[in-house]
Image (cartoon, rainbow, N blue to C red):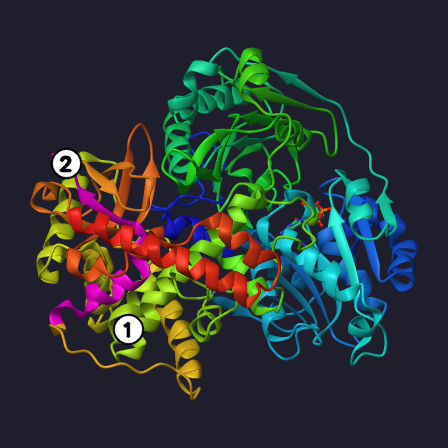
Amino acid sequence: MCFDEIFFHLLENDDQSPVGADSAQDSRMPAGAVQNPNRTEPPQSSMDAKKLPIYHQKNKLIQAVRENSFLIVSGETGSGKTTQLPQYLYEAGFCKDGKIGITQPRRVAAITVAQRVAQEMHCSLGLEVGYQVRFDDFTTPSTVVKYMTDGCLLREVLADPALSAYGVIILDEVHERSLNTDILLGLLKKVFSNPHTASKGRSFPLKVVVMSATMETDKLSVFLNNCPVFTIPGRVYPVTCKFGQAVGPKDLESTAYVKEVVKVALNVHTTEMAGDILVFLTGQVEIERACDLLFEKAECIDYRYDVYDRTVEGLLILPLYGSMPTDQQKQIFQPPPPGIRKCVVATNIAATSLTIDGIKYIVDSGFVKQLNHNSRVGLDVLEVVPISKSEARQRAGRAGRTSAGKCFRIYTTEFWEKCMPEYTVPEIQRSSLTAVILTLKCLGIHDVIRFPYLACPEERFILEALKQLYQFDAIDRRGKVTKLGELMVEFPLHPGLTRALLKAASLGCQDLLLPVAAMLSVENIFIRPGQPEKQKEADQKHKALVAKTGSMNDFALLLTVFQSCKSSDRPSAWCKDNWIHWRALKSAFSVETQLREILLRLQQRRDFPVETFDGNKSELFRQCLCTGYFTNVARRSVGKVFCTMDGHGSMVHIHPSSSLFEQETELNWVIFHDVMVTSRVYIRTVCPIRYDWVKDLLPKLHEVDVYELSSVAREEVTDDEMKKWETKEAAKRQQGSKVMKKL
Ligand code: CDP
Ligand code: MG
């Protein structure tokens, strides 16, 4: 599995932006642009809010929430649902009994919307209006309107299943079908259909509002016991769509789409009337590449001759992706200076979660970065895939909010017909369920197969998750959560990484693992500049850090960087000097503190495991890692090719970014953090290990038959059945150990 990206995503949908390149990039205004007049925040008058379609429904909406404990609100993106409804409910006094909590699948949306609403309500962010995303809590005891990621609410449910701190829960962007929102829907349906639970400790029962763009509301209503649907009427203007010639079915594996979107965007800029452009691309690296190219090319434009609309005098280029610094994200919403055309180059986040005013033109690459279970390698990987037709329509629709617009698709009609599916498959049906299944189990939901899913995941995905939880000792053979599982669920990390961390903590060496867990939870810390000269310099600096580490081990390298920077007098200068992202490292420091706090709290429990260690101390670090990463073991087969040991036997290569790259022929056994699939399957963040350390753990990978687990998942197994099963397992285990000995 791909720990880093997947689980960051699993626990909190970070809009799937890949991480990597230097993002110290600001908005750009090439030659011909009016100089930045030091714009201040646009005055936020109540007039703006009154222009939104939702405003005309204000009283009816408040009434509908009052009368129903479950309500679906649907309306076009940009109609004002996310920013206005919580304010209406606040004004109407719904906060008396508890907070108004609004979930978002994407962290960027939670943050920027909270900023906007705080501004509209004339309060400082963190007071009445606040936000909470993983590892970043911007709320205070006075916060009553709380925006948060769906992952955060799921964690709150764990601590307080009755959600007693809330008077209203608004599940937003439900049409996005993120894994956590889907699970929350099922939980709220299950728990709060019971009037007793819903009204426990409150003067009125918890109100649940489910908000969605105008998609699938009938199905949602049936799922939520036929609850009423409140539709916000809104006008959409026609958008003419034009297909391109550039990207066809044969281009699925190439990245030519970056160059093509740049070409098309520039063409729009020079040949179309004034109006802003929104370009849809896949992730941070592609977006920054496109922004560089756009900037370079736009600088050559002579505004006296080259542009069709003479009122257009410049281009303002703005990137938008999940891991961008918040102050830069804010800029996206500000209107450009007069005469300047704004061009936002964004991930899918701009399709529904965020509405940027003034967009008249869309440039659609046709691709998205998505987390998928890759059956070729038997792992979850983040890959670039064609968007669905419904997604393409949604992207185009962003040009028709306030007037007629145009959408330029860079792909051919043949690509549309042959490569693009009709609808996007919900995340729950295409990604790893390990973390959510553990959450459900900890909530006392034993039968995770018959849980009310809005869309059922394939049973084999549920069984895979159970199998993995069993391998990590988080559940026992009867499917019950173990003591370890109860500890594991407290960490907003992938269970494997948590397992390694808890092992280290039980041996008293958490200081080795906490920084590593933190570093793996933030974006990539190593800067890779585009210019070859600078690239060489960065490579040398990074090699020096590897040398300082004293061993070829990517995990240890993360620890060295963390410790060296932390102990430096001027950490930011240290980062600059060593080509390390200071912003990412700063987040890692904060994440480490938070993980340490969770651990300290758990260590105060009387049942926290304590072990002693009688092996070689210098190997302790790697042995702890093995307890969490034994599911990601690879053995060198021939030359530079490694073979995974998880039963799939996939052929993998060490990624060039690893400090072990070029040393691979000297290694035999390694563990790895994640995989990246291009034409080859690469393993990243690698650590050499000894077979001895995983010898006893590996048979566990083959020990349980997932189909046998299904009976455990469905209901409590009788003792008789359990005995039969155990006898069979013992026989298999013997066979398994024979296999291992042969290796
Ligand atoms: O949720 P829905 O898509 O219905 O609309 P919304 O997100 O509440 O957006 C309503 C308006 O607020 C739009 O015109 C957005 O452009 C604006 N907005 C903004 O200017 N800045 C934000 N951070 C969020 C929304
Ligand atoms: Mg919204």
Q: Are marks 2 and 1 in contact (CB under 8 Å)?
A: no
Residue 343 visible in the picture: yes
Of 645 and 366, the residue lying toward us: 645
Instruction: Respond yes or no on whether mark 1 lies under 8 Å from ligand 1.
Output: no
Q: Please state if 113 lies on the left or on the right of 708 as rendered.
A: right
Q: Residues within 10 Å of mark 1 (few under 14, many from 20)?
A: many
**Residue 636 part of the magenta-drawn span:** yes
Q: Which residue is mark 1?
A: 504
* In front of the other: 520 or 623: 623
Amino acid type, label 1:
Ala
In percent of the image, x 60 and y 34: which residue is there?
424
- In the rendered image, residue 381, in percent from the top left (x then y), is placed at 41, 41
Specify the amino acid type for callout 2: Lys
Which quarter of the picture shows residue 111? bottom right
The residue labelled by disc 2 is 640
Q: Which residues are magenta?
A: 618-640
